[in-house]
Image (cartoon, rainbow, N blue to C red):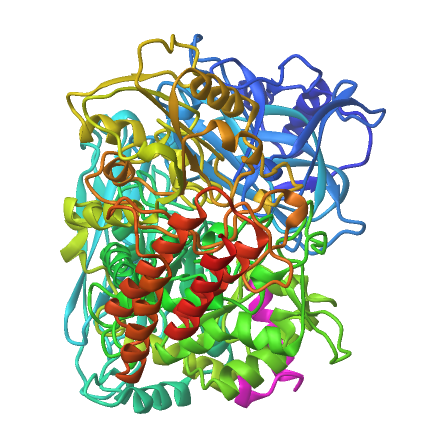
Amino acid sequence: MHRRHPRRRTSTAVLAAAAVLGALLTGAAPGAAADEPAPVAVDRFEGEVPFADPPADGIFTWGSDADDRPGLTITARPDAPEGGKVLEGSYHISGWGGFSHEFATDRPAHDWSRHRGVRFWWYGQNTAPLPPGSGRRVHFEIKDGGTSGGASELWTTSFTDDWSGWHLVELPFTTFQYRTDYQPVGGIDQVLGLKEMWGYAVTLPPGAPGTFAVDGLELYGQADPALSASVVAGAAVHPVDEGGAARVDVSVATTGSRPLDAPVTVAYGTEGGTARPGEDYTPVSGTFTFPAGTPSGATRTIVVRTREDGAAEPAETVPVRLTVTGAKAPAEQPQVVVNAHGLPYLDARLPVRKRVADLLSRMTLAEKAGQMTQAERGALRSQGDIAAYGLGSLLSGGGSVPNPNTPESWARMIDAYQLRARATRFQIPLIYGVDAVHGHNNVVGSTIMPHNIGIGAGRDPDLARRAGAVTAKEVRATGIPWDFAPCLCVTRDERWGRSYEAFGEDPALVTAMETVIEGMQGAASGKDLSRNDKVLTSAKHFVGDGGTAFGSSATGSYTIDQGVTKVTREELEAVHLAPFAEAVKRGTGTVMPSYSSLDVIGDDAGPVKMHANAAMINGVLKGRMGFDGFVISDWQAIDQIPGDYPSDVRTSVNAGLDMIMVPTDYPGFVTALKDEVTAGRIGGARIDDAVSRILTQKFRLGLFEKPYADTTHLEEIGSPAHRAVAREAAATSQVLLKNEGALLPLRPSQKVYVAGSNADDLGNQSGGWTISWQGSSGRITTGTTILEGMRKAAPGADITYSKDASAPTAGHDVGVVVVGETPYAEGVGDVGNGHDLELSAADKAAVDRVCAAMECAVLIVSGRPQLIGDRLGAVDALVASWLPGTEGDGVADVLYGKRPFTGQLPVTWPRSEAQLPVNVGDSVYDPQFPYGWGLTTLTKPAAGGEAALRAVAAAARVLEATGQEDSRVARDLVARARLIVQERIGTDMTAAVAKPFAEAEHLRLTGDLSGAVARLTAAYRAAG
């Protein structure tokens, strides 16, 4: 609890004296006050505790990315409640962030068991007092047991900042709850012992900038004796079919798992709820006691028997109230739920449209609003809110994972959330979503595919389909039926931090790779969605996210991401809308709009946020294209629409959004949505349309029949068979840009010198969106680095590794320098936002040292082209490795010739940043390497010249006449012509050559074989 206090200094001594006086005034004996321990300071914030990271004793910050870490200072203030200084901070958190004080690990843990709780002074930021609970919520966590703060058991509570100025926040230890969403070591004994404490953490509210000040954090009061034992209900929700019996297990747990010191009594009874006692169930009540000496974990069972009346009914609840004496009561009372039965929407034999119509006709506005709400799982104030608000969906943002982060933990977590949905009237299952953008990339040990940019380089629609199928199988095995993928962005400027999420710069290439939708969802009709190896897809980001202009972003320090796409109507149709038209044909189940704004030249509307663009969402997507799935917003994206929050809700829903990824303030969204409908500013028909679309996909997914995880394929996550597909994808993604003297492939007999920052770094080669949102360097999951793959591919080879190339270079036959980027995601990776297109100084030095000493191959592991023109002459072989994922074996396969290089550039490789944006089809086009470029080691150098090109042209006409322009034969035929031209060009790339060469690849992808060969012939002649 917290109290408002005057803004004046209040010493610890004064607080202690006040406690004694309060005891006297209430008639308590003076001795009672004297028995209370004196407050014990934890942090005075006078500078006595330094800013320092573990294992030292210190205060430190943390966050989901660098921008989410708050800024902290120890500041002198005349109004400091205790001493002369306070801890001040500022924050603007998009994911999660806060600060911690962890005690030194080389000293004993602290004993807090004598005290009632922890309290501190907090400087409220509200300009006027608000009703309790309406301010911004701050979470406070304590670290109990284990060997350190990082290996402890986490217990959490929260308070709301409802006040202005200093107020005293008191948090009794009885209010702290065991964290079920994350535990660094998976939990210890789930009892708050308080005898071995390692510190605390404060999690600050996300979504908007803020400041805070805190002072005088201390332990206070007399300990609650009930804390040494807790009564735990086995589950919060106990579904049972009508006429069946529910068994509610009640257990006792103690600190250190020791036997009970004193008896614990539990009185129980069924009362309240929507079920009728005596008609729907037989009431029960009673008392049982766990005697002193009872072992921790002992369990008693309460049986609640339901009655069968034969009537069709929605679900009904029977709360079981537990009153505990001698121990801490459960944080939440269990309830029995009599399952819904006999209603038409539950009949799987009926057509989906009839099931939807029946269910929709029964729902209230509040239930409909809940279905349109998606919350981040970590933002749940309690899991009971899933039923309280009738939430339609939860998601895991990047890095929002269970602990331990294993497939089994994911499945258990999803099942626990689905269990909560069983407590709603109609038991509408949740639809849980994740960003599995290159494999099930949040899960440690999963199969991590190359990012889309590498799949585009591979130019293999069948492999894209198989990669999608592997991802879908792994995602669905963990109980998740919805994947926020694929990204159908057409990247037009490689300064964009999301360019690697695109298949390429050419809409024809993006469209060709949309076979991934079939791999993930199955048939376009949706008939395969209920399978345990398929997931609902989300085509994103509609529309134009890859076309934003550099410098147009208004989001924080971003330079291009979430900016403005300014295009003609013709360019919009041809470049950005075309992939979404294909996705609708392929049956994508959901579409996600872009954060960006669209400014169509000539319509005089100016930039319009895509989340507010009714003309595009209602008019083009749902109207002209006939999209019948549902539209899901991006993370907190409607908040960027101009206007207040009710206006944001009204504008986005009326524009055609069906579900809102809130993701944190779901109570506020539900309230705002209901208010807008009640006021008539959102029509009831619009709400019914949105909910019908959502329910349709839930029925198609089979969630009403099977809401819980089908773990049949759980053991296949990260399996050799799945990794073999990822290995093949990694191999085909490698683009050989230069290969003087046929340096590649390597021979096992050669003595190889390997260097560079990305040769032996699994995190770097996997990129962003790997285990966490931004990704990170190092061995963050299971896989094979490129260096490890090379050693496996040539087990007898003499391979020297020196990351910085400091080891002696003499005596080696060839060098392999693996350089490139470190991970990033979204606008954090925008050029100009702490990033550029240059190699690091260390990587440049490694290239220079190795390539000066021996013949060398340079591999660039990156999400976008890196500028290497000034070193190109010294490099014998150059490979664009993109972000190959966890299977470095695939890269080694092409390096050692086990597979040929066959990849082609999915984007144009510029000579300089000043050339950007540069794309196939531009009137001025003079890159380092053109779109579509890619040498091969599959065959001997192509020969035949123009005579061979004329023969290819004739064969192309035959294929077109017989409708085979999209066949493998056609692809191989044009590839033959391309290789002839590349052999002619060599290293003499000019604008006259590059422009027709790149245009040929675009024409080939559109099925114009004759046009493609004609442009290749033009390039051949220009190279003469």
Viewer-nearest residue: 930 or 1022: 1022
Q: Is 47 positioned to the left or the right of 689 in the image?
A: right
Q: Residue at x 26, y 51 (%)?
A: 412
- Residue 226, can we see it? no
Q: Position of residue 647 (x, y in %)?
A: 70, 72
Magenta segment range?
A: 667-686
The answer to whether residue 322 is above or below residue 194 is below
Q: Is residue 863 left or right of residue 604?
A: left
User: Is 815 in front, or is 634?
Assistant: 815
The mark tally for this picture is 0
Residue situated in front as seen by the camera: 739 or 542: 739
Residue 147 at x, y percent in the picture: 36, 18
Magenta run includes residue 999: no
Q: Which image quarter: residue 421?
A: bottom left
Q: Is residue 354 visible?
A: yes
Residue found at x 53% / y 19%: 53
Which residue is pictured at 18% across the width and 47% down the height? 300
Q: Main secondary structure of the magenta part?
A: helix
**Seen in the image, is 127 located left or right of residue 807?**
right
Residue at the right extreme, as displayed: 78
342 sits to left or right of 42 = left
Question: Residue 102, position in %: x, y?
Answer: 51, 21
Magenta includes 673? yes
When asked about the image quadrant of residue 886, the answer is top left
**What x and y, as percent, mark residue 259?**
21, 27
Q: Residue at 29%, 46% (x, y): give it.
A: 941
- Quadrant containing the N terminus in the rendered view: top right
- Which of the pair 391/514 is nearer the observer? 514
